[in-house]
């Protein structure tokens, strides 16, 4: 099963590039940029990854991001993720980046963007991984600050197909950013939003009705609202679920209590993703494996999750068809793909 999951063609749609910063690279970049870290060793950093909720994670996440200073740093960070993704047969990835946590430190938007984007271009030519870039607004900052970041992104909008909303969910409903998202859509951006991780189902409704999102990031608390579940099934609005992250941040007490299998079996377009893999104990294959083991997912269900990931992507219909055909070919060997 482990080999089947690793080699399964798949897309990753919920991945924060800053959340792929492994402790080893954190120390390497700190030394490169003459930054003093509050940790003495890699093991001390990992020992700090004992989160009680989303905010306790974000505190360390933003602290780690401070070692990212130059375009080469952002390139190296992104390239390291792409190499890992390639080893787990990720065929397409849609990557979040948080420019506000860098521009607030005096790092130019262009520096962040160019480093990440160039690595993604090289990932296509050298590793065969297609990609899209999603600009995320930090919801615990003001809408005015989000507007300013949107303005900075406009010169690059041809290569940034979507905007999103992440960071501390509690007390920061999607409605806070309605005007920002209205402007983004007017400029041609697609929209996504984190909702229903720690926040209530009402936040998911707001993301759908006010922000006009194409998909919901997380969305696991939709299970609390039967009407919402019916709507998600009817409209096939995808959920980008992150199992290990949900357990590490105490959204669920254990993987065995995660609702991924229930969501999938209801007919929701659920997908599996790694969120911030260096902090939560695994990349996409480890998320698939942990969910499969704890929830007794069948190979047919794993196939459906992978198929959903391509269907939920921002790829062209032609590219989706090609990747799903590749998935079908892979699974047909085990007589899994349905006609």
Image: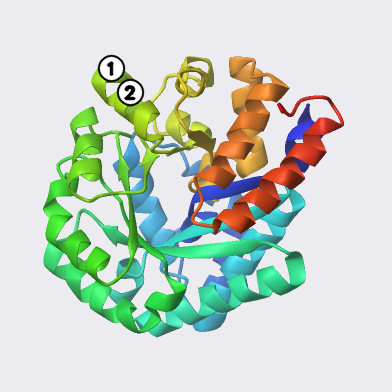
Q: Position of residue 34 (x, y in %)?
A: 49, 79
Which residue matches tag 2?
229
Look at 42% across and 77% down and name the residue there.
Answer: 158
Q: Position of residue 153 (x, y in %)?
A: 33, 77
Q: Is residue 232 above or below residue 60?
A: above
Return the mark for residue 226. Answer: 1
Q: Secondary structure at mark 2?
A: helix
| Along the viewing direction, whichever of 208 and 325 lies nearer the viewer | 325
Q: Is residue 22 visible?
A: no
| Along the viewing direction, whichever of 150 and 333 lies nearer the viewer | 333
Q: Residues within 10 Å of mark 1 (few under 14, many from 20)?
A: few
**CB contact under 8 Å: marks 2 and 1:** yes
Q: Is residue 32 left or right of residue 249?
A: right
User: Mark 2 to mark 1: distance in Å?
Assistant: 5 Å
Q: Is residue 227 above or below residue 179?
A: above
In this view, which residue lies farthest toward the front? 339
Q: Quadrant of the C terminus?
A: top right
Q: Is residue 150 visible?
A: yes
Q: Secondary structure at mark 1?
A: helix
Q: Is residue 159 above or below residue 192?
A: below
In this view, which residue lies farthest toward the right? 333
Look at 72% across and 56% down and name the residue there.
Answer: 86
Look at 13% across and 61% down and name the residue there.
Answer: 179
Q: Is residue 154 above or below residue 299?
A: below
Return the mark for residue 324. Answer: none
Picture quarter containing residue 189?
Answer: bottom left
């Amino acid at each position: 099963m482990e080999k089947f999951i690793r080699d399964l063609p798949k897309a990753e749609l919920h991945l924060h590039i800053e959340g792929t910063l492994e402790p080893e690279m954190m120390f390497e970049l700190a030394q490169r940029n003459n930054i003093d870290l509050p940790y003495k060793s890699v093991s001390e950093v990992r020992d700090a990854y004992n989160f009680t909720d989303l905010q306790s994670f974000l505190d360390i996440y933003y602290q780690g991001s401070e070692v990212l200073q130059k375009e080469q740093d952002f390139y190296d960070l992104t390239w390291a993720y792409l190499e890992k993704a390639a080893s787990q047969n990720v065929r397409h990835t849609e990557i979040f980046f948080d420019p506000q946590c860098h521009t607030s430190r005096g790092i130019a938007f262009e520096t962040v963007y160019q480093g990440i984007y160039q690595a993604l271009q090289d990932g296509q030519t050298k590793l065969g991984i297609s990609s899209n870039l999603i600009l995320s607004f930090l919801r615990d900052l003001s809408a005015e600050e989000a507007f300013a970041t949107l303005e900075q992104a406009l010169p690059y909008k041809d290569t940034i197909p979507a905007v999103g909303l992440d960071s501390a969910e509690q007390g920061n409903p999607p409605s806070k950013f309605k005007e920002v998202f209205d402007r983004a859509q007017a400029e041609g951006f697609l929209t996504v939003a984190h909702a229903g991780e720690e926040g209530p189902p009402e936040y998911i409704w707001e993301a759908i009705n006010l922000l006009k999102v194409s998909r919901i990031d997380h969305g696991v608390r939709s299970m609390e609202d039967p009407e919402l579940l019916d709507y998600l099934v009817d409209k096939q609005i995808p959920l980008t679920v992150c199992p290990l992250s949900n357990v590490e941040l105490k959204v669920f007490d254990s993987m065995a209590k995660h609702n991924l299998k229930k969501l999938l079996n209801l007919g929701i377009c659920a997908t599996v993703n790694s969120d911030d893999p260096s902090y939560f104990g695994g990349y996409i294959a480890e998320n698939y494996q942990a969910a499969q083991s704890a929830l007794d997912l069948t190979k047919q269900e794993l196939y459906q999750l992978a198929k959903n990931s391509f269907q939920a992507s921002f790829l062209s219909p032609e590219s989706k068809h090609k990747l799903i055909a590749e998935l079908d070919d892979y699974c047909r060997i085990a007589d899994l793909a349905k006609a």
